[in-house]
Amino acid sequence: MTMTPKLLVLSAPSGAGKSTICNLLLERNPDFRLSISATTRPPRGNERNAVEYFFLSKDEFFAKVERNEFLEYAEVHGHYYGTLKSSVEALLQQGFTVLFDIDVIGALNIKKQYPEAMLIFIRPPSQEELIHRLKNRKTENEAQIQKRLERLPMEYENARYFDHQVVNDDLLSTVERVEQLIRGQ
Ligand code: 5GP
C-alpha cells in the first residue's frame, strides 16, 4: 500500500494559476486544509484576516520569528510571508492533508523538516502566456509585473528539486493530475 503524503506543497511563478488550483483542490477534497500563512502584506480586495492570511505588522511578524514560531519564512515581492508551526501541527493532528501555497524557497524548507511532504511545481504553458495572464488579471502594475518576472530564473532553478512539475494548460486537468499524484497514481 502506498502512503498518501499528508503535506502537499504547491509553488509556481506568479500568474501560473496556483491560487485557483488550490481553491479547486480544497473544494474537491474535504480532507484537505490550507495552511494559512502569516504575512506583512496588506490585505487585497476582500481578503479577510485568518482566512487567506494572518495579516501582521512587521513588528508582530518579527516577534514571531524571534519566538521561533515559523516552520519557514521568506521575503517575496517585498513582503514577508511565513508558515506557522502551530497551525500545521494542529491540522496534521486532526488528520487533514495540509495544502501549502508558498514560494519555492519556503517549499524546499518545508521538505527539510517534513521529508515526506510532496512538492509540486506548477508551470505556466509558456512565458508569453504567463505575461498575458499577469497583465490580464490587472491586480499588478507594470513595475510589479516586472518584479514578479525577475524571480522566474530563480524559481525555475529551484523547481528541479521538486518531486513533480505539472504544466497548467488546462485548469481541470491540472487539478486532476495533482490529485492523482498525491493519491499515488
Ligand atoms: P500573494 O501576495 O500573491 O498572496 O503571495 C505572494 C507569494 O508569496 C506567492 O508565491 C505565495 O505562494 C507566497 N507565500 C504565501 N505564503 C507564504 C509562506 O508562508 N511562505 C512562503 N515562503 N511563501 C509564501
Image (cartoon, grey):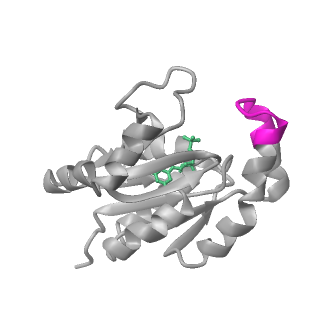
Q: On screen, 127 above or below 57?
A: below
From the viewer's perspective, tell me whether residue 137 is left or right of residue 38: right
Q: Nearer the viewer, residue 61 or 174?
A: 61
Badge count: 0
Residue under the point 82% across and 43% down: 132
Residue under the point 48% across and 62% down: 106
- Write down the quadrant of residue 66 in the picture: bottom left
From the viewer's perspective, tell me whether residue 94 is left or right of residue 3: left
In the rendered image, residue 18, in percent from the top left (x then y), is placed at: 57, 49
From the viewer's perspective, tell me whether residue 71 is left or right of residue 156: left
Image quarter (top left, top right, bottom left or bottom right) of the C terminus: bottom left
Residue under the point 53% across and 29% down: 42
- Write down the quadrant of residue 4 in the picture: bottom left
Q: Nearer the viewer, residue 162 or 64?
A: 64
Q: Nearer the viewer, residue 64 or 160?
A: 64
Residue under the point 37% across and 43% down: 36
Image quarter (top left, top right, bottom left or bottom right) of the N terminus: bottom left
In the rendered image, residue 111, in percent from the top left (x then y), is placed at: 39, 72
In the rendered image, residue 23, in percent from the top left (x then y), is placed at: 46, 40
Q: On screen, 75 above or below 54?
A: below
